[in-house]
Image (cartoon, grey):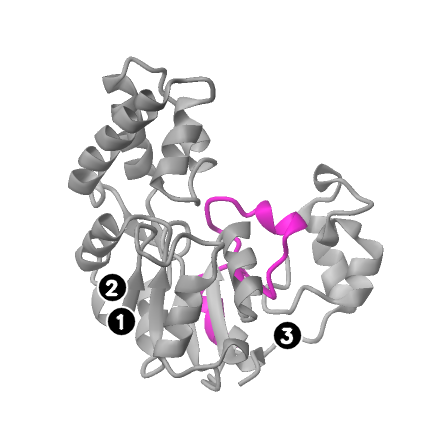
Amino acid sequence: MINSNIRVQYPPIAKYIGCFYGQQVKRREVDWSFLSICRNLFSEPDCPKQAMDTECGLIVFDLDGTLVETRDDLARSVNHALGESGLPRHPVEVVVQFVGDGARKLVERSVGPGKKGVIYDEVLDAFLSHYIEHCTDRCTLYPGVAKVLESLAPLPLCVLTNKPLGPTERILQALGLAPHFQSVIGGDSHFGRKPDPAGLLHLIKAAGAAPESSLLVGDTRVDVLTAREARCLCAGVRYGFRPDDFMDCPPDYLIESMEDLPAILQQAPG
């Protein structure tokens, strides 16, 4: 089992596993069990989880694949929109691979290349109309999310997602998460979408925190790249939509469950 509560960007590992920098070893040639062995050899000892050190000044969370399991609702709305335009539908597992860069990119990838621009607009409108009404039909919290968010108070918490703000707020309200967050920024804001760091930098400034004491928690390379651009730390969740992203774009920390997050805070610099 992978030692999840460690920094993964160690020079010894990078030396022997070039995939951490996209070099030497192709992504498919190294599996997580092999990485686990290397991390156990070169990493620091496990960090105790009994006490929390809240020197971290701000935690910013992604939504889909990080706090909330939303793939079924997303896939149903995408396939509804595709069907309205007479286009082929996709299995849930395929749609999930299209998620992460905002609604328009999700639709463009679902429709596929070579179509007229008007088709993309039609499918996008149909998707957004359906999704805003059905975004909470099947969505659920990942294990440990509610408990951990409660335990983090009074540490400032925010949400930064590429999902439009409308469905984001509906999901947070429906699942009882809204009171935990002092700010929520969606992908349709004037800050742009991740990996543009503008939204993250705004949240850091508004919280009176510093980038080096802020932590972004997410499930794809988009989150890692956003954190890097903002010069803050990133924790990647292994249970999300695209955990393989971390093979060639590693976060500072990897966690198997949201319940591992308090231990990460013990390691994050304040």
Residue drawn where x is 78% and y is 47% of the image: 23
Q: Position of residue 184 (x, y in %)?
A: 29, 63
The answer to whether residue 141 is magenta is: no
> Earlier along the polypeptide chain: callout 3 or callout 1?
3
User: Disc 3 residue type?
Assistant: Asp
- Magenta region, residue range: 235-263
Q: Residues within 10 Å of mark 2 (few under 14, many from 20)?
A: some
Locate residue 37: give its quadrant: bottom right
Q: Position of residue 252 (x, y in %)?
A: 61, 66
User: Of helix, strand and loop, which one carries label 3?
Assistant: loop
> Does 134 sit left or right of 269 as displayed?
left
Q: Which mark is residue 177?
A: 2
> Does 177 sit left or right of 206 as displayed?
left
Q: Residue furthest top?
A: 86
Viewer can see residue 181? no
User: Disc 1 residue type?
Assistant: His
Q: Which mark is residue 180?
A: 1
Question: Which residue lies under the disc numbered 3?
Answer: 46
Q: Nearer the viewer, residue 48 or 66?
A: 66
Pointers 2 and 1 in contact (CB under 8 A)?
A: yes
